[in-house]
Amino acid sequence: MMDDYNVDVFVNRDDPIPTVVIDGSTPPRPRTPETPAEHSDAETPSVRKGLRGRFSAFKEKARIQDQLVEKLLSQVVPVDDAQIPQDEALKGGSPGVERPNFNLTTMSNNFRRFNARIGVVFVFQARVERLLSWKRPTHTLSFLAIYTFVCLDPYLLPLLPLTILLIGVLIPSFVARHPAAEFSLSSEQAIGYSPHGPPLAPAIQVKPVKELSRDFFRNMRDLQNSMEDFSQLHDGIIRLVVPRTNFSDEALSSALFVVLFVACLFMSIASNVLPWRLIFLTLGWAVTCMGHPAIQRQLQTAHEKHIHPQEEKARGWVEKWVERDVILDSAPETREVEIFELQRLSNAGEWEPWLFSASPYDPLSPSRIAGDRPVGTRFFEDVLPPKGWEWSEKKWALDLWSREWVEERIITGVEVETEGERWVYDIYDEQAAEKVGVVEQPTPVKGKDKAKLLSPKPSWEEGEDGDGRRGEWRRRRWVRLVKRKNIPETT
């Protein structure tokens, strides 16, 4: 009796937590009603030593668990003993934290430990639902009184966890160690509660429920229902939010974006003057009162009579406003891309086609100064549009305004051809040609020879008209329009 007295477990022994059913969702499977034997708090028969003996002793009264384990194994374990795919270990994780890969044994062990300890969450959930559904009106009104004080004086908010710890944990623990004296109602003298004296009872110890016990299966029942609740809530939010925010209907999503943007502007200006205490107080009372059964019936009747007939009219008004005021681009975005055709002067004095490059390879380009060769493709047909784009025109067009792109890039040391084929030539650098090979120290000269050497020569950028000599490279620019490519839907 001592062990049962000082050990407490958190289990929801009340009615099962109801599963939320959202309109249009898949209804949950009917739950298996509990037999009268399942309401008993008695533990399972004594188990034998060893894991195999444990399961065999429980085999007669645990058919449901066997079916559950078999179903889980058939869904998780790969077919034909295939190896379970493993992810690479994460690098740079927190020191001392181990994140092992999936293992069926570890998964089974962790699930049993988790299910034996999750009862506190379900107890809290059941009590919150009981509080908001007005099962005990005195408790709900007390909650609303505390909520009103916190809304009117938000500085009381840090006091709540301390008060909960004091009243909900410490005082019950003290009363458990110092229980009141038992007396009969027929006795002439009632003995009041006295906290004096040494502890009379052992301290309460919170332990997980025993595996394969009735409480263990109650936790599995509530866990099953909570998973269904989460799935229903997740699917309902996806159906409500995603079609309106993922721009599948671009006009509707654009209208929603405009409304939210205006709301952000309004809140950024007026948020400091809004009575937030009164707003939260009103919302809290409204939400709590909506949980009362009588008010729920009134709201449902009002919705069917007044709101539901107007839903189609309101939806039609919104659709007309979106169709009338939201204008979308009908044509895809287009851009102009460029490619430079490079040719090189051969030793025979003829221009040879070299390649098509994304860079003009001008005399002062970094690759030219570094001595690198131009990069590109040799044929026009091999030039591809940028990633995510496709050709909007069938052919390339020669850029007839060659001087403009030269001036935009601030290219020097070139000669621009404004007529004909619009080539842009390198200017012949005579000084660079003379310095090819070993450079010797110049011998001193005098008189007329010195005057000839000191006479100014045309600069490399200016060139010399009529000399007919040009540099090693020439290039011209081709342009073509591209448009954004439609991305196919992935299943």
Image: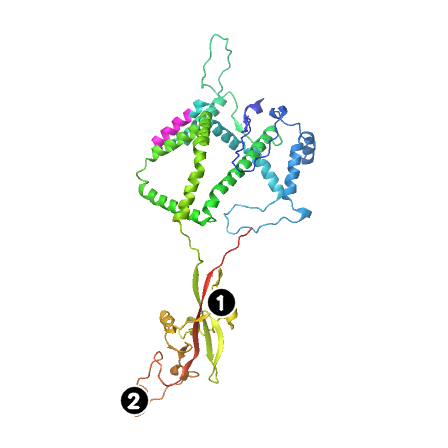
Q: Helix, strand or loop at disc 1?
A: loop
Q: Amino acid at mark 1?
A: Lys
Q: Helix, strand or loop at disc 2?
A: helix
In which quadrant will I find the N terminus? top right
- In this rendering, does residue 82 appear at all? yes
Does residue 252 sit above or below 126 in this rendering?
below
- Quadrant of residue 423 within the rendered picture: bottom left
* Residue under the point 48% across and 29% down: 129
Quote the CA–CA distance across marks 2 and 1: 60 Å
- In this rendering, does residue 156 appear at all? no
Pointer 1: what residue? 394
Relative depth, front residue between 487 and 426:
487
Pointer 2: what residue? 451
For label 1, count other residues whose C-alpha is less than 10 Å away and answer few (under 14), some (14-19) or many (20+).
few
- Quadrant of residue 298 within the rendered picture: top left
**For the residues carrying marks 2 and 1, which lies nearer the camera in this image?**
1
Does residue 247 sit above or below 57 in this rendering?
below
Residue 360 in the image: x percent, y percent? 43, 72
**Residue 229 appears left or right of 412:** right
Q: Which residues are magenta?
A: 141-155
Please say whether residue 401 is one of the residues in the magenta stretch.
Answer: no
